[in-house]
Structures are given as C-alpha cells and as structure tokens.
Image (cartoon, helix red, strand yellow):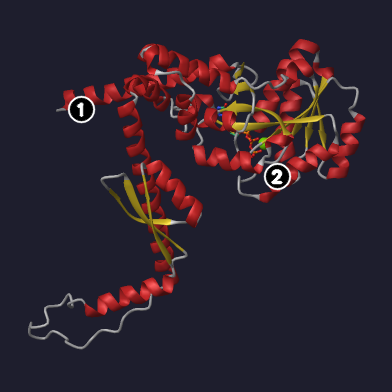
C-alpha cells in the first residue's frame, strides 16, 4: 500500500495532485484544512490481505463482547474468522462509496468557496444545477462567463445562452435528407417505435413507396415481427437482414428508395456487441447514417457509458426518447454537449406517429427549465402537504 500526503491552496488543486500521483483509484484517507490551504492523505494499491491481518489483530486484542467475568462465560479465545471473499468485496465497495462521498463533499466545498468569492454568479450556478446538468458542464459554463460587473440576472441569462450554444451541434434531419438511416441504442429505449414514427411521417408526406424498413436485429426472437407489424399498419415494405452480408445486399437493392430506415438490436451499454453492431451497420453501406437513441430518464452515468459504447465518430446525431417519463433533461443534455452530438428529434410518448417532435437547442433548454420549474413546484406542493398534514 502506498500512502502519501498532499498539500495545496485549495481542494480542487490538491485532488488534481492526488489523481496525477496515484491515479483514479486512489482512496482518500483524510483531509483537513490548514493555515495555508488544504491537506489530503490518500492511498493506492492497498493490500487487502494486510488490511485484514490488521483488522484480525485489532479484533484479537479487543475485549470479548461477552462479559469475561460473568458466570458461564467462555473465556477461551474464539478463532479469528477468515474474511470471506464476499466480505472483502463489500469492504472494497464500501471504500469506493466513501471515496466518492468524500469527493462529492470536497467538490461542494470548493464550489461553496468559489461562490463565496463570486457571489454574482450564484443565481447562474443555481439555475444550471436546477436543470441537473453535470458538475463538469456547470463548471464549463460558469468559467466562461464574464466578470461580476454584469449583475446576477444578466449572468444567469448569459449562462442559459451559453448552454444553447454548447448544444448547437449540426445534425441532419433524416426526414429532410433521406438516404439510409439506422437507429442504435441500448435495450428498450424506443428505437423500433421511433423508427416507425419516422416511417409514418415520411410515408404521409411522400407516399408509402418512398420508404422501406429493414430489420437487422438477428439477436432476438420476435424482433422482426414488431417491425413487420408496423410495416403492415403503415403500408410500408419491410426487409429482414440478419447477417452483415444480407444487410449489404438488401441496402444495395434498395439504393433507389428515398428513405431506408434500419432497425438494430438493443443491448446493454456494457455489451461489446453494441459497438460491433454499429461498426457492422456502417460497413454495410457508406451511405448509412446512424443516430443514437438516448432515453431522457436515464442517469448521467448510464448515458455516459452508452455513448462510450457508441463512438461519436460513427454517429450522425442523436434522438432523445421517453421525454414524457423524464423529470429533468440535464443528464442527457450534458452528455450530448460533452460528446458533441446534435439532436434532431424528441420522442415524447408511445403513439405512432404523433409523439415525435423536431427540436432545436433553444427548445431543449426551455424544456429543461420547464422540468426544473415543475420539480420546484412539486417540492413546494410536498412542503404544503406536510404543513396541512401537520
Ligand atoms: N413513454 C414512452 N414510451 C416509449 C417511447 N418510445 C417507446 N416507448 C415504449 O418503450 C417500449 C420499448 O420500445 P421499443 O421501440 O420496442 O424499444 P427498442 O429500443 O426498439 O427495444 P429493443 O429492440 O428491445 O432494444 C415500448 O413499450 C414502447 O411503446 C416514448 O417516447 N415514451
Ligand atoms: Mg427494437
């Protein structure tokens, strides 16, 4: 185990030193404020066997929980139980949780310090946080704001304008551009339903012959049937291509169809096949443009993992699904901006084709603010309920 002491003027710079010296797996053992700044003690490569030896040693020296003087008490030393791998795992998880809790506290401490020195930025910070944007995004926006001379309201307004700019990443609208369009994403996010909505819109505008559906989901039983049913309902032709060679052949055959919509298999965001599938789709035609379907209710960490598995260099843009089930837009907007992915459509319900909206960056920010207002009024309602109930 390597233990090291770090000192610096503020928490953020000391944490940076910890990461650089000990890497991302460092465990923070203690932190304290000093006259000149902050001191953090952190460890890495901690040796679990030695930790357990120390625990066992400490236990063997501790008084027995049974009163040793009480009649009938067994005064023999109980053998020290060998820690099972489950308990080792639990200790490791607990340490991980403590580490992230501490880091969160230190983060909020450094924010508090920063806001203490920049009181005019408080309203902008609070607004960005109420949208549930990631701290990284919040920091990026705040650090680009001008000085305090602007006034709190103006800074808040500029923070929102800056969020709109960060989301203004061009992405082509498949319904305007046509061509071969594939939707990719994790399980059950609404790929097939969104595809059917797009097909219905295009068929209504240009006739059912101008659009075809292709099912490339060779992984799940019944996957083709869902698309076939939509095809029948919409009067749109459906093709099945289970292998890479079949997909290449089908897409070549459909080269004169104005819009070809390709459905793909949903997989967990940590499943390597998700990345492989995207590469395979792209290998099937150089005209194919893939859009990631990202569910608005998903947590930031899940969305981050999803876009990690779907490299942005292979994507033409994104569509946000299940807006109607979301309570905030901050997590999905943070990921889209960080990965430089433009959004073209929002799916806000199960109805085909009604629940699909074209969106723009300013519209996304207005919606994110509306969610934050709803949350605030929801928590006010809760307070009132509490007052009435009391
Ligand atoms: N509330 C809500 N439900 C939706 C939306 N889009 C799709 N759904 C529902 O989500 C469920 C899954 O939708 P699918 O379109 O089958 O999702 P998928 O991504 O194709 O799923 P897999 O192919 O299994 O990965 C269905 O019950 C849909 O009706 C949406 O925008 N809002
Ligand atoms: Mg599907």
Contact check, label 1 and label 2, Cβ < 8 Å: no
Residue to which mark 2 is pinned: 275
Percent x, y of residue 348:
55, 22
Percent x, y of residue 370:
43, 17
Q: Residue at position x 38%, y 13% from top?
A: 149
Q: Secondary structure at mark 2?
A: helix
- State left or right for residue 236 relative to residue 350: right
Examine the rendered structure and indicate whether residue 5 appears above or below residue 160: below
Residue to which mark 1 is pinned: 386
Image quarter for residue 188? top right
Q: Residue at position x 42%, y 67% from top?
A: 88
Examine the rendered structure and indicate whether residue 329 appears above or below residue 221: above
- State left or right for residue 48 relative to residue 57: right
Query: Could you tell which of marks 1 and 2 lies nearer the N-terminus?
Result: 2
Specify few, some or many for label 1: CA neighbours under 10 Å numbering under 14, 14-19, or 20 or more. few
Percent x, y of residue 14:
40, 47
């Amino acid at each position: 185990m390597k233990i090291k002491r770090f000192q610096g003027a503020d928490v953020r710079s000391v944490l940076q030193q910890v990461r650089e010296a000990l890497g991302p797996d460092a465990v923070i053992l203690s932190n304290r404020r000093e006259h000149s700044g902050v001191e953090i003690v952190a460890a890495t490569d901690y040796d679990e066997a030695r930790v357990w030896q120390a625990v066992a040693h400490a236990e063997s020296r501790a008084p027995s929980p049974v009163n040793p003087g009480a009649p009938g008490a067994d005064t023999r030393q109980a053998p020290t139980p060998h820690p099972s791998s489950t308990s080792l795992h639990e200790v490791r998880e607990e340490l991980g949780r403590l580490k992230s809790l501490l880091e969160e506290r230190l983060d909020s401490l450094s924010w508090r310090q920063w806001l203490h020195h920049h009181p005019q930025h408080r309203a902008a910070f609070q607004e960005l946080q109420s949208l549930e944007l990631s701290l990284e995004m919040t920091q990026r926006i705040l650090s680009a704001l001008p000085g305090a001379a602007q006034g709190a309201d103006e800074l808040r307004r500029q923070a929102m304008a800056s969020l709109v700019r960060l989301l203004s990443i061009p992405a082509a609208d498949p319904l305007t551009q046509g061509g071969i369009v594939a939707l990719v994403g994790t399980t059950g996010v609404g790929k097939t339903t969104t595809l059917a909505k797009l097909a219905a819109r295009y068929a209504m505008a240009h006739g059912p012959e101008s659009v075809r559906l292709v099912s490339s989901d060779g992984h799940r039983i019944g996957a083709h049937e869902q698309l076939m049913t939509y095809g029948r309902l919409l009067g749109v032709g459906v093709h099945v291509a289970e292998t890479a060679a079949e997909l290449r052949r089908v897409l070549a055959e459909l080269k004169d169809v104005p819009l070809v919509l390709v459905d793909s298999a949903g997989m967990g965001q940590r499943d390597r096949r998700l990345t492989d599938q995207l590469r395979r789709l792209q290998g099937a035609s150089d005209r194919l443009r893939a859009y990631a379907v990202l569910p608005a209710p998903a947590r930031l960490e899940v969305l981050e993992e999803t876009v990690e598995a779907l490299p942005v260099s292979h994507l033409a843009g994104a569509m946000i699904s299940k807006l109607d089930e979301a309570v905030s837009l901050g997590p999905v907007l943070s990921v889209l901006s960080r990965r430089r992915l433009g959004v073209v459509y929002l799916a806000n319900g199960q109805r085909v084709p009604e629940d699909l909206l074209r969106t723009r960056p300013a519209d996304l920010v207005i919606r994110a603010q509306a969610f934050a207002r709803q949350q605030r009024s929801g928590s006010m309602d809760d307070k009132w309920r509490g007052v009435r109930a009391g």
